[in-house]
Structure formats: C-alpha cells, structure tokens
C-alpha cells in the first residue's frame, strides 16, 4: 500500500505499522521501543520518545494546513488549499519518522526550519556525511537525522543540506531557485533513534559501476538487499549524475531502516 501527497508516492515502509488515535493525535505508533505521536494539527508538532527521552519536532510552513488525516498505515497527510508547500509525516516500520515536504512551485522558499524541543543539555552536531547527531544527556545513544535528499517531479536530484545552530534548530535548505527543475519537489528529512548506521564512500570506479547499473559490485560492499534498495531508490541515476561531474556516490545505511539514502560528494 502507498499514499500520495503533492504528487509524490510515499514508500510502503509502514504497511505493517499499527496506530491508534485520540482527540489530539492523528496517529500514535510504537515500533522498536520508539513511540511516534503525529498530531491532527500540523502546528502542534510531532514527538518521538525512546529510552525515556522525548524529542519534539515542529514542522515548517504549517500555516493554512488542514487537519491531518491517516491516508495509509502510519502516514498522516496535511492537505492545503493554498500556499506553495505541503507536509506529510510517516511513522515507518523501523521506528523512525519521515517528514515529507512538498515544494509546489518556484515561489516556494528554499529554507525550511524545524524547531526541536530537546531535553536540557542536548546538542546537535553536523557530521561529515551531512547527517545530524542529536546527543541527549544521560544516554550513550541519541537521535540521528539522516543526510537530506530532494527529488523533482522527474526524479532528478535537487541539492539539499542541513544547517543547525547546534542547540534547537535545524534548517533544511533545498536549492531550487533559478535551477532547471520540474515541480513539485519532494524533500525527505528522516529521523531515528540510535546512532546505528554507517556511510559507504564509493570511489570513482565504484561510482561508474553503479552508474552503469552494475549493482552486483555494490552488493559486495553492502549486501544484496541494500544494493537492490540503491537501485530501486534512484541510485543509478544519482551515480551517473556524480560520475559525469567528477564526484562520487555516497550511501548512508541505517541498521534500523530497511533502505538507504544516497548523496554525492568529493571522492
């Protein structure tokens, strides 16, 4: 099963997620000891609770959004009849949370601010791979915010990156103004509990193999199902994009998440 928001088909990584609801929450799920509470009102913010630590996430540009509705298991969409952005939130089968921001047209901003309600003494650190680590006091673990990605309506990669004040605010910047892109653009922040992942840095030859569709070579590094996920989620065209520009494909893999995120960087 899948759901569509802003013309984008959400992946079916929450088909087996069971949710409840109440007067304030459109969907509440507990998976892998992580409880995700998605509100009916977008401005109320999403909460994730794990290991006794609660993280609150305020979504960007919620003015004018209507009441959130469950459109598929674990997925809440917030319709809007005006404005140039839309939002959806997905609690997936790993216990992580996806935030879908739909950029409808060229009038939409490039910067989307997520305010975090963190336990006192927490900190946010940007990693070399573009991800963010949220350290919380009293725990050897914390939240991880995966490297962001954005795709246009044709599936082309749109540059996206995180900025943070290190304390309570993260800014998703999607560089689309003046670019040759097809709207709508979908940007996908993804947040999970636990620093349980790694970055695979492909060299030039590996990136060329991936661009040619030789996913068997990639499988030698990251395993068959992850290699299949790279191909299914656009790894080949992104590898081609990187190779033609003298860059290399990088793959961020989470042990919790049954998929991967790709981005490009210097070799």
Image: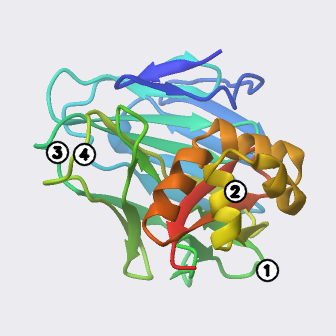
Q: In the rendering, at what x and y percent does residue 195 appear?
A: 74, 70
Q: Which mark lies nearer to you, 4 or 2?
A: 2
Task: Give the position of the C terminus as an image quadrant.
Answer: bottom right
Q: Is residue 130 left or right of residue 209?
A: left
Helix or strand or loop: what does disc 4 sit on?
loop
Q: Is residue 196 above or below residue 24?
A: below
The residue at the point 44 percent across, 82 percent down is: 166
Between the C-alphas of marks 3 and 2, the distance is 36 Å
- The numbered disc on residue 209 is 2
Between the C-alphas of marks 3 and 1, the distance is 39 Å
Q: Which mark lies nearer to you, 1 or 2?
A: 2
- The numbered disc on residue 61 is 4
Between the C-alphas of marks 4 and 2, the distance is 40 Å
- The numbered disc on residue 140 is 1
Q: Tell me the quarter of the picture where residue 203 sits.
A: bottom right
For this rendering, which residue is in front, 203 or 29?
Answer: 203
Between the C-alphas of marks 4 and 1, the distance is 33 Å
- The residue pinned by badge 3 equals 108
Q: Which mark lies nearer to you, 3 or 4?
A: 3
Q: Which is more N-terminal, label 2 or label 1?
A: 1
The residue at the point 89 percent across, 59 percent down is: 220
Q: Which mark lies nearer to you, 3 or 1?
A: 3
């Amino acid at each position: 099963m899948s759901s569509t928001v802003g013309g984008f088909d959400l992946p079916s990584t929450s088909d087996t997620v069971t949710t409840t609801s109440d007067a304030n929450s459109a969907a509440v799920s507990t998976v892998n000891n992580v409880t995700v509470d998605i509100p009916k009102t977008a401005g109320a913010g999403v909460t994730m609770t794990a290991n006794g630590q609660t993280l609150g996430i305020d979504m960007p540009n919620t003015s004018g959004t209507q009441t959130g509705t469950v459109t598929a298991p674990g997925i809440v969409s917030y319709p809007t009849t005006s404005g140039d952005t839309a939002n959806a939130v997905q609690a997936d089968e790993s216990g992580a949370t996806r935030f879908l921001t739909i950029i409808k047209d060229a009038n939409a901003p490039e910067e989307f601010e997520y305010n975090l309600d963190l336990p006192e003494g927490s900190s946010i650190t940007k990693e070399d791979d573009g991800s963010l680590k949220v350290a919380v006091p009293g725990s050897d673990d914390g939240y991880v915010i995966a490297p962001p990605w954005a795709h246009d309506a044709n599936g082309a990669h749109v540059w996206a990156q995180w900025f943070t004040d290190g304390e309570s605010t993260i800014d998703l910047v999607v560089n689309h103004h003046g670019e040759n892109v097809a709207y709508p653009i979908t940007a996908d922040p993804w947040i999970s509990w636990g620093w349980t992942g790694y970055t695979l840095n492909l060299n030039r030859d590996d990136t060329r193999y991936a661009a040619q569709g030789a996913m068997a070579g990639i499988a030698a590094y990251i395993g068959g199902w992850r290699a299949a996920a790279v191909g299914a989620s656009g790894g080949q065209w992104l590898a081609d994009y990187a190779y033609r520009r003298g860059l290399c494909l990088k793959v961020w893999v989470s042990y919790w998440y049954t998929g991967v995120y790709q981005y490009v960087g210097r070799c």
